[in-house]
Amino acid sequence: MSTTSSSNGSGAVGRGRQKKKFLSPSAKYEIWLQLIRGEVTISAAASSAGVDRSTILRIRTVAKDASMAALAASKPGVGKSVRDVELEEANAEIARLGEAVKELAVKLTLLEGKGGPVSW
């Protein structure tokens, strides 16, 4: 029996990689909550979940980034749905483009000399 075989039983030489373990979103959320509350360390969370420490670090980073983005997007008072925000943005773009078209139509009319004399 070789002393260099890995402990995962694969028979690979040296330290073998564990099979990837996929965590559900709810499991990731629970891990994140435990980290935030200070109930577990990163090493303890990784050990209990059966994943690498880098996985726990990634969960923490993703949760923080998503939380910051959500908080930055939130406004005090009555909240708007994503659809309402997108609709407002689209209407603002339509208004901006409408004004640009009007301006270009006036310039084109002046350049081509169509429509007779321009009276303001």
Image (tube, grey):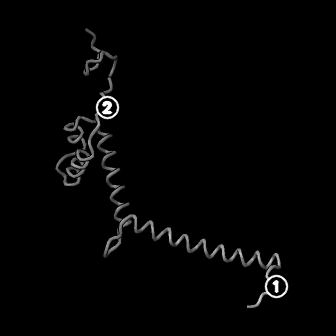
> Does dot 2 land on a helix, a strand or a loop?
loop
| Marks 2 and 1 in Cβ contact (< 8 Å) | no
Residue of label 1: 116
Quadrant location, the C terminus: bottom right
Q: How many marks?
A: 2
> Does dot 1 land on a helix, a strand or a loop?
loop
Question: Disc 2 or 1, which lies upstream in sequence?
Answer: 2
**Where, by quadrant of the figure, is residue 102 drawn?**
bottom right
Residue ID at (40%, 68%): 84
Residue ID at (21%, 52%): 33
Q: As displayed, is residue 98 above or below residue 39?
A: below
Residue 66 spot, x, y in % from top left: 35, 56
Residue 2 spot, x, y in % from top left: 28, 10
Q: As displayed, is residue 77 above or below residue 21?
A: below
Quadrant location, the N terminus: top left
Residue 57 spot, x, y in % from top left: 31, 45
Residue ID at (81%, 87%): 117
Q: Amino acid at mark 2?
A: Lys
In the current view of this chain or complex, which residue is farthest to the front?
A: 115
Q: Nearer the viewer, residue 39 or 27?
A: 27
Residue 42 spot, x, y in % from top left: 25, 44
Q: Amino acid at mark 1?
A: Gly
Local crowd size for mark 2, using a 10 Å CA cut-off: few (<14), some (14–19), many (≥20): few
Residue of label 2: 20
Q: Nearer the viewer, residue 62 or 36?
A: 62
Local crowd size for mark 1, using a 10 Å CA cut-off: few (<14), some (14–19), many (≥20): few
